[in-house]
Image (tube, grey):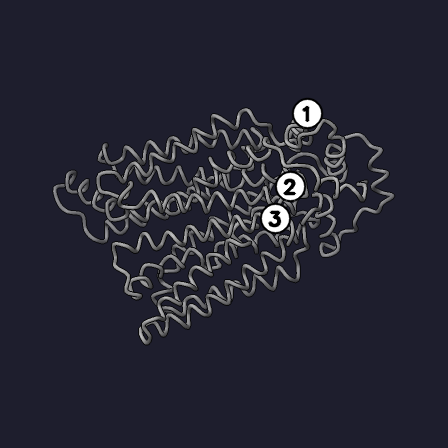
């Protein structure tokens, strides 16, 4: 059992350079690349379409049809989500065999291959290379968005687990911002340089390959899945910067003793187990809201609103940099505040604030042409929606997926969360253009409903996970799952057994 003063002792423990390095470099070669690939194709879109047209003309001796170019471009953009789904489907098996750190290192191979294909596609006069490259970098992102939060959650002390977990969100936002900056016409957003935007993919991957091998594997993985107690002890010592880690080892042992099965559970076993039913429902709802809350759709209106406000077309790319900056700033502030405020309040605030600003945006868009200053209010609403998203909903769903499940169920849980994430991402990309065409600016009211429903569900069901052990969090769901929580006497009895 934990000493009541353990939490105070933990808070006095300084954050080590080893832990910060592991968080930063693991996220740099993973979630940063995901964020970068969300924004990097926007700037060179016209040049890539021109390349498709020229390649088609050289091959077949006639210009490509407008519909064919649109189809090829749509495939280039949307196949990223299909690759992400394939990556999410494979991650459970890979982390079981290679571990968390090993999976992240292997994943860099996909990034390097994708970088080569995307960079050399123009020289090889092959648009197929660009499409395959986008598919492969999608696989990389699908694996990264499951393996990285798993690794960050398992290497962090419970009192800063949320802050370390927010490295995932911060680096996603930083990746988006970097893609926007490098895509400026003065840098790589030119007809003669656009392919080098994809060469940059190799840089974070190589950095991670150079640094991550010298940092420890997840101590929980080493102890509970590899049965390597000595390795787990060394990993804890490096991450925590202290020699005596007996308390941390005992916490992992206690979690192991409380589990029905120490072997990694399959997706089917996770779906069948009533003891984790509401954890699973919570993750599915939260991850679906993460994608369906409307942030991806907001980009559709940004340029149009700025044009309506009277900004010249050539300066709009510089103004839209503010969206990437606001994203990154909000994610950093959220990472600093998450251990004070908690996961649940930040999620509820984020989704409810998005509902408010989407409602205001709908009103302002409908009066866009009636008053000269109305487009400015619309753009302020867009920035507010982005900031609200990044304050909680933009990163906490990944943290919760790692926190709500014990070790044996975690890989399967991340696989299901990844499937929901990427299918929802694909659905928004596929359906929003039709939704917008039918409802016009009222399309945002659909996202208002989704945000409100997500807020109500989280308020009613989700317990606060701040500064709790994984076992404590699991037991907090016992009542709603109608599973009796272990009594103190049962825990004492378990503690006498050997794993």
Q: Indicate the quadrant where residue 494 lies.
A: top right
Label 2 Cα neighbours within 10 Å, binned few <14 / some 14-19 / many ≥20: many
Element on which disc 1 rests:
loop
Relative to 391, is 494 on the left or the right? right
N-terminal-most mark, 3 or 1: 1
Residue 99 rendering spot, x and y as whole percentages: 58, 30
**Identity of the residue drawn at 51% across and 54% down:** 290
Q: Quadrant of the C terminus?
A: top right
Residue 399 rendering spot, x and y as whole percentages: 59, 46
* Cα–Cα gap, marks 2 and 1: 19 Å
Residue marked by disc 2: 409
Q: Between residues 372 and 470, which one lies in front from this camera angle?
A: 372
Please report contact status of discs 3 and 1: CB closer than 8 Å, yes or no: no
Label 1 Cα neighbours within 10 Å, binned few <14 / some 14-19 / many ≥20: some
Q: Foreground mark, 2 or 1? A: 1
Rendered image: mark on residue 325? none
Element on which disc 2 rests:
helix
Relative to 443, is 391 on the left or the right? right
* Cα–Cα gap, marks 3 and 2: 13 Å
N-terminal-most mark, 2 or 1: 1
Residue 130 rendering spot, x and y as whole percentages: 30, 39
* Cα–Cα gap, marks 3 and 1: 26 Å
| Above or below, comparing residue 167 to residue 327 in the picture | above
Residue marked by disc 3: 400
Residue marked by disc 1: 228
Residue 2 rendering spot, x and y as whole percentages: 79, 41
């Amino acid at each position: 059992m934990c000493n009541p003063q353990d939490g105070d002792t933990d808070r006095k423990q300084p954050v080590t350079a080893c832990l910060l390095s592991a968080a930063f470099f693991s996220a740099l070669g993973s979630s940063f690349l995901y964020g970068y690939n969300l924004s990097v194709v926007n700037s060179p879109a016209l040049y890539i379409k021109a390349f498709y047209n020229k390649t088609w003309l050289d091959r077949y001796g006639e210009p490509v049809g407008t519909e064919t170019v649109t189809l090829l471009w749509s495939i280039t953009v949307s196949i990223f989500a299909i690759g992400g789904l394939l990556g999410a489907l494979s991650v459970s098996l890979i982390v079981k065999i290679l571990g968390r750190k090993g999976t992240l290192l292997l994943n860099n191979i996909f990034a390097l291959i994708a970088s080569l294909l995307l960079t050399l596609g123009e020289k090889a006069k092959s648009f197929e290379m660009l499409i395959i490259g986008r598919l492969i970098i999608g696989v990389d992102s699908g694996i990264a968005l499951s393996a990285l939060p798993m690794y960050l959650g398992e290497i962090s002390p419970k009192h800063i687990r949320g802050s370390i977990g927010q490295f995932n969100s911060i680096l996603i936002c930083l990746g988006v911002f970097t893609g926007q900056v490098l895509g400026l016409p003065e840098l790589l957003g030119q007809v003669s340089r656009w392919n080098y935007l994809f060469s940059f993919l190799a840089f974070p991957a190589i950095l991670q390959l150079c640094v991550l091998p010298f940092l420890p594997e997840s101590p929980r993985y080493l102890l509970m899945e590899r049965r390597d107690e000595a390795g787990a002890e060394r990993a804890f010592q490096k991450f925590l910067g202290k020699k005596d880690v007996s308390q941390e080892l005992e916490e992992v042992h206690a979690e192991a003793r409380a589990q029905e099965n120490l072997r990694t559970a399959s997706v089917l076993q996770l779906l069948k187990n009533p003891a984790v039913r509401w954890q699973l429902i919570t993750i599915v709802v939260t991850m679906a809201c993460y994608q369906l809350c409307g942030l991806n759709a907001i980009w559709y209106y940004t340029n149009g609103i700025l044009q309506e406000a009277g900004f010249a077309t050539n300066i709009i790319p510089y103004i839209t940099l503010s969206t990437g900056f606001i994203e990154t700033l909000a994610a950093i502030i959220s990472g600093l505040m998450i251990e004070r405020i908690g996961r649940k309040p930040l999620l509820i605030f984020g989704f409810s604030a998005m509902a408010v600003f989407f409602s205001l945006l709908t009103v302002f868009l409908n009066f866009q042409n009636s008053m000269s200053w109305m487009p400015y209010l619309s753009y302020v609403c867009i920035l507010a929606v982005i900031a609200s998203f990044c304050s909680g909903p933009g990163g906490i769903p990944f943290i919760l997926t790692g926190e709500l499940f014990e070790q044996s169920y975690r890989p399967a849980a991340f696989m299901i969360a990844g499937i929901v994430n990427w299918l929802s991402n694909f659905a928004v990309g596929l359906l929003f253009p039709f939704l917008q065409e039918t409802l016009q600016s009222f399309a945002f009211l659909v996202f208002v409903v989704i945000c409100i429903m997500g807020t109500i569900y989280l308020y009613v069901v989700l317990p606060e996970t701040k500064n709790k052990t994984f076992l404590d969090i699991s037991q907090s769901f016992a009542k709603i799952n109608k599973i009796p929580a272990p009594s103190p006497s049962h825990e004492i009895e378990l503690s006498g057994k050997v794993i």
